[in-house]
Amino acid sequence: MLDDPPESDTDAPANITHWYDPSSTATTITDGDGTRVVDDDGTEYLDFVSQLYCVNAGHGNRAIVDAMTDQLQRIQYVSSAKRTPARTELSRELAAVAPDSLSNVLFSVSGSEANELAMTIARDYADAPKVLSRWRSYHGSTYGAGSTTGDPETREPLEAHASTSGAVKFLPPMSYDSPFDADTPAELAEAAADHLEFVIKNEGPDTIAAILTEPIAGTSGAYTAPPGYFERVRELCDEYDILLIVDEVITGFGRCGDWFGIQTAGVEPDMLTFAKGVTSAYAPLAGTMMRPEIAEQVRSGGFDIGQTFGGHPVGCAAGVAALEEYADGLIENVRAADDAFADRLSALERTHDVVADVRGRGFLRAVEFADPETGAPFHDPRVDDGDNPVRDVIDAAGDRGVLFGAGRPATQLMLAPPLCATTDEIDTAVETLGSAIDTVF
């Protein structure tokens, strides 16, 4: 047995967490059930961020665990270059619930890799190098996916020593702190779509393979597009022969009240990427769905790229079970609680003048903070040093037993509970958030 590693001056554990912050200590989670998790001290928390927007079916779902166990007892791993029943079944189930335009799936491991696969396929299909994505987006933290991410906090560490080409940004139709001069949602949709068309023309339509976009913004703030915006985006893609790829890594599998977020906008994409909720995060699994004509080109030309764990059979078994759970009342629960969730947060905005905006859809919501006198953030982590009161609100809520997540940038916090959350739990979470705001501000 190897000797124990030497202790550092900080006596830090050997594991370095993702999004590591040397100034804070990560909570150790040891158990969970439904909407709640427990730490190593036995403290219970209401998990209102589903860990990383992914435990959609809640913790400890027996049907998903049993499906994974059954698969492990049959065969534990099958090469991603071969077929196996779990993959075949999940592919059929995904095609049944996805937008009608999509019928084929290529599995991968993570959302970042799914987006990179989508970009690779789109560039080959369109024979064009560029992919357009919006500022304040998040599509992953690997080099390829990170290049399309519009969040500087992700891109800056990735591109400190190297960068990728073919990534072009456009401005999103944000309802709060908008870059466009618009007084109504209709004006915002028109201005944002006109801007996108300008970017397309400026770059040259023939050089653009695809537009990659989240249908509802994820960690950048749960922004919903104004009515008519995605319809116009679809028209622009058709007019200029550009593929529309929707990133459903966070918004998929019921989180926004339908199987996929783009279905709440009534628009048919050319490709769709997914991860996280497909297994309720019980196992790593992701994938890229596409129109039949795109899939036919992949099949006819071959695809000499692969990932060892793409479409892992245990993950696929978990995915089949998770989809059954979503269909068996969980998505309906999101729809039923949608208005109540929005109403509770609107009341929070009315009673706390530091809450500048609340927004979102279904079980993906954001609360934005700003100085009521200036309208500016109290602390903008992109340019300001020192303590951030939004982080303090999250810590104060955690001390009261409710977990929220920080948005990107952390001028806002995110609320994304498991789909099994009740209206009573929503009430508890929002009341706790109000108490934490009162304590900090």
Image (cartoon, grey):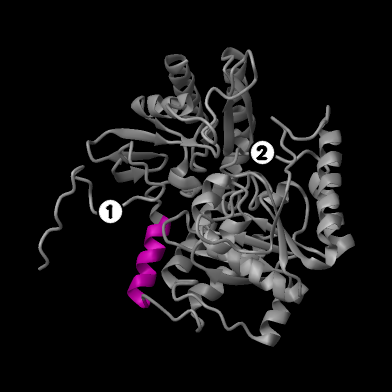
Which residue sits at x=49%, y=19%?
Answer: 434
Q: Residues within 10 Å of mark 1 (few under 14, many from 20)?
A: few
Which of marks 2 and 1 precedes in the sequence?
1
**Please, what is the dominant secondary structure of the magenta stretch?**
helix
- In the shown orientation, is residue 60 left or right of residue 328? left
Q: Nearer the viewer, residue 379 or 280?
A: 379
Which residue sits at x=45%, y=55%?
Answer: 281
Which residue sits at x=65%, y=52%?
Answer: 260
Farthest-out residue, right: 239
- The image shows residue 193, relative to residue 358, as above or below, that is below
Farthest-out residue, front: 161
Residue 436 percent across, percent down from the top left: 43, 20
Q: Which amino acid type is shown beneath numbered disc 1?
A: Asn
| Residue bearing mark 1 | 15
Q: Which mark is residue 223?
A: 2
Q: Nearer the viewer, mark 1 or mark 2?
A: 1
Mark 2 lies on a secondary structure that is loop
User: Which range is magenta?
Assistant: 63-75
